[in-house]
Image (spheres, grey):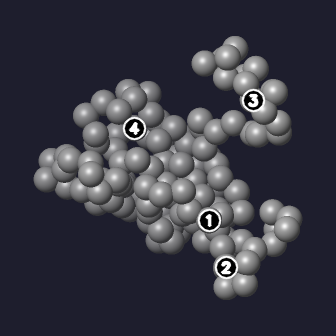
Amino acid sequence: MSNKEVPPGFEKDLQNIAIDFDGVVHDFSKGWHDGTCYGDPLPGSLDAIRELSKKYNIIIFTAKVKPSRPLVGGKSGTTLVSEWLESHGVLECVDEITCEKPRARVYIDDKGYRFNNWEDTLEFVNKEL
């Protein structure tokens, strides 16, 4: 099965683009900081979300929305991320916000590594990390 084929009933998942929130959509210069959704949108991120949402289902993924995460200022992570996206005019372009790795055609993540084989992967991990 190729990466463009899916089991019956999952065809709609080929329309999903999964985008990491921290460091991809917004400036993550303070790291985890205080748990808030701070920072400005990264250049081009909002326009890209708007453009991609015309053809794909946009899924934002972030650890900020884990159910086990404590409330920040009385708000859940889902509420904080939703409010940030709404304040920047792209919430209506987003189909889902999750902490889980969703089924998607592609993942856009600042911490991703493109796997080709284990020899190169081990070399990268041992050298870079």
Q: Which residue is denoted by mark 3 in the rendering?
A: 121
Residue 118 placement: quadrant: top right
Amino acid beneath label 2:
Phe
Find residue 39 and name its label: 4
Say whether residue 128 is left or right of residue 31: right
Q: Residue furthest bottom?
A: 9
The mark that comes first in sequence, 3 or 4, is 4
Per the image, label 1 sits on a secondary structure element best described as: loop
Tell me whether circle 4 and circle 2 mark residues in contact (CB < 8 Å): no
The mark that comes first in sequence, 2 or 3, is 2
Find residue 73 and name its label: none
- Establish if 104 lies above or below 7: above
Q: Which residue is denoted by mark 1 in the rendering?
A: 103
Q: Which residue is denoted by mark 2 in the rendering?
A: 10
The mark that comes first in sequence, 4 or 1, is 4
For residue 98, say whether it is visible: yes
Query: What separation in Å lies between label 1 and label 2 (alpha carbons)?
Result: 9 Å
Query: What separation in Å lies between label 4 and label 2 (alpha carbons)?
Result: 35 Å
Q: Nearer the viewer, mark 3 or mark 1?
A: 3
Q: Which residue is more in the foreground, 9 or 28?
A: 9
Query: What separation in Å lies between label 3 and label 4 (alpha carbons)?
Result: 32 Å
Q: Residues within 10 Å of mark 3 (few under 14, many from 20)?
A: some
Q: Residues within 10 Å of mark 4 (few under 14, many from 20)?
A: some
**Picture coordinates of residue 62 (x, y %)?**
44, 50
Per the image, label 4 sits on a secondary structure element best described as: loop
Query: Residue at the location (64% across, 39% down)?
Result: 112
